[in-house]
Amino acid sequence: MSPPVRQPVGFFRATAILLRKDLLLEWRTRARVNALVFFALATLLLFAFALDANRNIMQAAAGGLLWLGLLFSSVLALGESFRVENENAALDGIRLVPASGRAIFIAKALGNTLLIYALGWLLLPVMVALYDIHLTLGPGPYAIALLLGCLSITAPGVVFSAIANNARARDVLLPLLLFPLLVPALLASVKATTLVFGGDPMDQLRSWLWLVAGFDVIYWALGFLLFPRVIED
Amino acid sequence: MHGLTDLLPTLLAQAANQAPSAPLPTGRITGGWGYVWFSYALTFLTLAGYGVSLWVRRPRPTKDV
Amino acid sequence: MPGMQTLARVLLAAGPADAEHIQPVTTGMIVKYAVTTVVGIALVWGVIRLFGWIEEKTRASFGVRAGLIGIGVILTAVGAYLGLFWAPPDRMMGDVQRIMYCHVPLLWNALIALCINFACSVLYLIKPSWKTDSLAEAAAETGVVMGANGVLLGAIWAKPTWGVWWTWDPRLIAAAIMLIAYAGYLALRRFIEDPDRRALWSSVVGILVAVDLPVVWFAVRWFRSIHQFQSSPSTVDPALRVPLRVMAFAFLFLLMGFLWQRYRIALAHRKDEVALPDALPTTARREVTP
């Protein structure tokens, strides 16, 4: 009688387990999520001071301010997301299970996307209060624009975070690598969100959303292809 | 050269500013040699400086460690 | 290939409704770009082999590098003379336009260097080698030096022609993003001590950045939707074309000389790093050795 051979779990199941693990970790250490939320709130508040609390300017710039707040928060979330794996060499443990690098990528990216996406919804009432914005097109388009933008931040973010996590000066390195890469997706997301807030008389929203979706495809495909090479040793 | 037509008013104003004694502004930018000399000098200094830095950093055959 | 075609169509058709000058994407274009990429990567591979051959089999390495730089310097002198004194002033921009003879060739050559970096990044992931890694490092640094110089010249040129140092023109934004992205790439290389990891990770970053750049270009163009300021050789007067070409080749020779020299520095550095005895403690040495 040979001992039962443990079958490695399939790709989707591995992804689901890893995602559940990440979310559970976030839930158990709620202090981190709380800190993230307050960081984002502080950012929005600071933007208001920077713009001299001028209602017209803030209204016009609200889309850009929202995405800057989300971007800064996402840098913190992404950095944290791999820092926890450093303790007890947890990432090596996961890889030895064995879980495929691609499953780790998808799980990490999805987990961070969910986090930033939730943050985007949390910030909405704050923006209404602080910047006096209106959700002119309703919550549906906002949900889509937010989700597509979050997806475009997290895929390259996870790749770079895994890299920066093992380098010196990782806190500087992650934004230095990530921000220039994200410019196109952010431009399109800002345009889309501004249209959601300010109305869309020229019917342009759809094309900007398609554009972000195109970037999502590129970023996620590249991350999916390249991430296993990043964590191989 | 399409975008130039939009810039024409600016160019005219500039030309008028830079050459107040000129009888008629022609739409052409006059002068500006300072910018040109500075640009060329900057380029050559940068490239020469980079070349020198490459020479300074050259791999040396003997390592005294 | 149909997948790529669809993706490109989605990307290109996705611009705002009022965007102008959007070229339709044809299968021919995609095939052309794909073939160019593959041929370019193969070419860089060949160049690395050639460098290696000259370095190992002949003693002419120093002579060849000195020759490249020497030709570059002579051509630069000729080009500068042609650009400054021989070429007539531009009909609209007058003498200020002479900045173009430095500005445009610098950026062309910076782009060549960054393309070499991309090719090396891909090559490294296919087949790891210190030579590809070294050339990638060399190309990124040379590209950033020339690119920064070119962008600076653009700002200087903008002051007398547009009245401001900087406009939020798509081309300018894309160039600035390119420089920052490759500055990040170079910073990454400095911040990782383990040569294996550095080579691997910088290749990944090099590919991501290079793929992102054309996308930046399209996105920014739609975002700003400004008229373009086209300057291709066919629209430029022949008298202006000669100094432009001379200068382009001058900087190309300088680029080749610089690249090779920088490549040798990087390669020697790699060999030192790899040759370090295991007993010596380094900060980034891996803890677990089988």
Image (cartoon, rainbow, N blue to C red):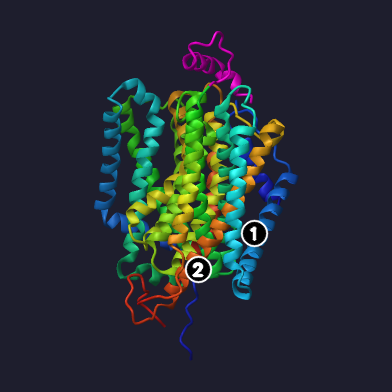
Question: Tag 2, which chain?
Answer: C
Q: Report helix, strand or loop for mark 1.
A: helix
- The stretch of residues the image draws in magenta is B1-30
In front of the other: A102 or B55: B55
Find residue C245 and report its image quarter.
top right
Q: Position of residue A198 (x, y in %)?
A: 44, 24
Select label 1 or label 2 by which is in front.
2
Where is mark 1, residue-wise? C41
Q: CA distance from mark 1 to mark 2?
A: 20 Å
Question: Above or below — where is A101 with respect to C3?
Answer: below
- Tell me which amino acid carries mark 1: Ile
- The quadrant of the rendering that contains the C terminus of chain B is bottom left
Q: Residues within 10 Å of mark 2 (few under 14, many from 20)?
A: many
| Label 1 packing within 10 angstroms: few (<14), some (14-19), many (20+) | many
Mark 1 vs mark 2: same chain? yes
Q: Label 2: state its secondary structure.
A: helix
Up-down: is B36 above or below A17? above
Residue at numbered disc 2: C267
Is B10 included in the stretch rendered in magenta? yes
Q: Is residue C236 left or right of residue A5?
A: right
**Which residue in the rendered view is the most extreme toward the top?**
B23
- Give how far across and how far down residue C182 sits, in percent: 47, 50
Callout 2 amino acid = Leu
Q: Which mark is residue A204?
A: none
- Check the residue under mark 1 and report the chain it is in: C
Query: For the point 36% across and 49% down, which residue is it?
Result: A75
Instruction: State if disc 2 and disc 1 touch (CB < 8 Å).
Output: no
- In the image, what residue occupies the spot 46% across and 74% down? B61
What is the number of callouts on the image?
2
The answer to whether residue A116 is magenta is no
